[in-house]
Image (cartoon, grey):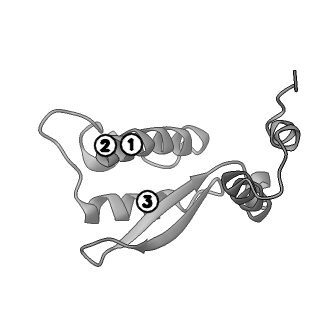
Amino acid sequence: MIRTVYFFALVAICHIATAQAPHLPTPKEYFGFAIGDDYNLATYTQTEAYFRKLAASDRVKLVDIGLTEEGRHQLMLIVTSPENHKKLDRYKEISTKLARAEGVSEEQAKAVYGVDSD
């Protein structure tokens, strides 16, 4: 399940990052095959190098989220507009508050997402 989520997240992130910054290589250009092609799988080292290359874009922030069971750095890409990158701390605060549901009423939670209270 985690690999499936990782796969779809990688495809989406790479598509968004390269669509917004054409000078960055697509996964197919970089790896030599499309993500998801039969009998082709990028290695950890290849994926890490590609993530670092994508991080050259002003739309991408590379974050180390800890070590894997094998002791490798697990990297995450945050892909958004340069304006939103400046607000990441605020978005993290909102996300944490909603995830824990501490001191947040249903109306307040809906207001954050722009949902009408019925």
Q: Tag count in the figure?
A: 3
Image position of 77 with respect to 10: above or below: below
Q: Marks 2 and 3: which is nearer the front?
A: 2
Residue type (three-letter) at the residue carrying disc 1: Val
Q: Label 3 amino acid?
A: Phe
* Residue nearer the viewer, 9 or 26: 9
Mark number, residue 1: 2
Tag 1: Cα neighbours inside 10 Å, few (<14), some, or many (≥20)? few
Residue at the (46%, 44%) spot, across then down: 14
Evaluate if marks 2 and 1 touch, with contact meaning CB atoms under 8 Å apart.
yes
Front residue of 31/92: it is: 92
Residue 17 is situated, as x and y percent measured from the top left of the image, at: 54, 45
Q: Nearer the viewer, residue 74 or 114?
A: 114
Residue 36 image point, x, y percent: 26, 35
Q: Nearer the viewer, residue 30 or 4?
A: 4
Q: Amino acid at mark 2?
A: Met
Residue under the image location 48 percent in, 60 percent down: 76
Q: Position of residue 108 (x, y in %)?
A: 87, 43
Provide the residue designation for mark 3: 51
Q: Nearer the viewer, mark 3 or mark 1?
A: 1
Answer with left or right where residue 27 lies relative to residue 21. left
